[in-house]
Image (cartoon, rainbow, N blue to C red):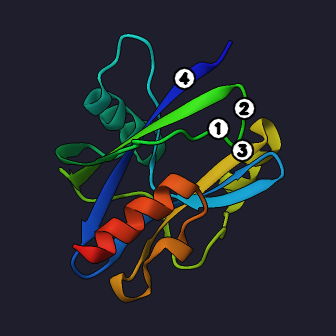
């Protein structure tokens, strides 16, 4: 029996800094993606995104316009019995970011490496300048489509 996994992602753009991305290391895989995560039972998509940014970045955000929802079949990269549905929104911070922003991909500090040792997963955040941003900057297939659409706007 196939199941659905609903993922919700936030596109945070800053005129000077660029586009916010998350560099993640889960088990043996490393990938760059938009920040966000899985929808929980009883949660709306916007509430999911607010929760994810609070948990992962300790950041309060406002969720603005809907940008994209997957409109084709996509299997999960992590569980081939699940179909992924991804929903993307523009978001903006409601406060100053306090998370330790990195400048290079997969630059994990001691705390993030300790999390990896404990949970076999960790993440760090960085901005990619608009001129350097595009589908090739991201790892996941749906993120690549959204990046291409953002660049065409």
**Mark 1 or mark 4: whose residue is earlier in sequence:** 4
> Within 10 angstroms of label 4, few (less than 14), some, or many (20 or more) residues?
few
Q: Is residue 117 left or right of residue 146?
A: right
**Disc ID at residue 79:** 2
The image quadrant of residue 62 is top left
In the picture, the quarter occupied by the N terminus is top right
Which of the marked residues, 2 or 4, is nearer the chain's N terminus? 4
**x and y percent of residue 109 in the render?**
67, 63
104 w.r.t. 106: above or below: below
Give the label, 3 or 2, closer to the camera.
2
Q: Residue at x 25, y 82 (%)?
A: 16
- On the image, numbered disc 3 is attached to which residue? 121
| Secondary structure type for disc 3 | strand
Q: Which residue position holds label 1?
A: 76
In this rendering, the answer to whether 65 lies above or below 23 is above
Give the spatial CA distance, label 3 vs label 2: 16 Å
Q: Position of residue 138 (x, y in %)?
A: 55, 66
Element class at badge 2: loop
Q: Are marks 4 and 3 in contact (CB under 8 Å)?
A: no
Q: Residue at x 48, y 57 (%)?
A: 143
Mark nearer the N terminus (1 vs 3): 1
* SS at circle 4: strand
In the rendered image, the vertical position of residue 105 relative to residue 58, given as above or below: below
Q: Which residue is mark 4?
A: 4
Marks 1/4 in contact by CB < 8 Å: the verdict is no
Percent position of residue 49, x then y: 34, 37
- Badge 2: how crowded within 10 Å, few (<14), some, or many (20+)? few
Pointer 4 or 3: first along the chain: 4
Query: Which one is nearer the viewer's eye here, 1 or 93?
Result: 1
Disc 1 crowd, CA 10 A, few/some/many (<14, 14-19, 20+): some
Between residue 16 and residue 64, name the one nearer to us: 64
In three-dimensional space, the C-alpha distance between marks 1 and 3, rounded to whole angstroms, equals 17 Å
């Amino acid at each position: 029996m196939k199941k659905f996994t609903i993922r919700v992602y936030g596109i945070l753009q800053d005129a000077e800094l660029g586009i916010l991305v998350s560099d993640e290391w889960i088990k043996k895989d490393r990938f760059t993606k938009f920040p966000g995560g899985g929808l929980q039972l009883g949660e709306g998509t916007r509430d999911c995104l607010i929760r994810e940014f609070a948990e992962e970045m300790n950041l309060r955000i406002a969720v603005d316009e809907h940008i994209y929802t997957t409109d084709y079949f996509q299997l999960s990269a992590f569980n081939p019995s699940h179909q992924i549905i991804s929903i993307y929104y523009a978001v903006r911070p409601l406060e100053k970011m306090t998370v330790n922003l990195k400048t290079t991909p997969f630059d994990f500090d001691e705390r993030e490496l300790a999390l990896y040792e404990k949970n076999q997963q960790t993440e760090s955040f960085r901005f990619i300048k608009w001129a350097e941003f595009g589908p090739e900057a991201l790892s996941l297939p749906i993120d690549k489509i959204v990046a291409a659409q953002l660049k065409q706007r």
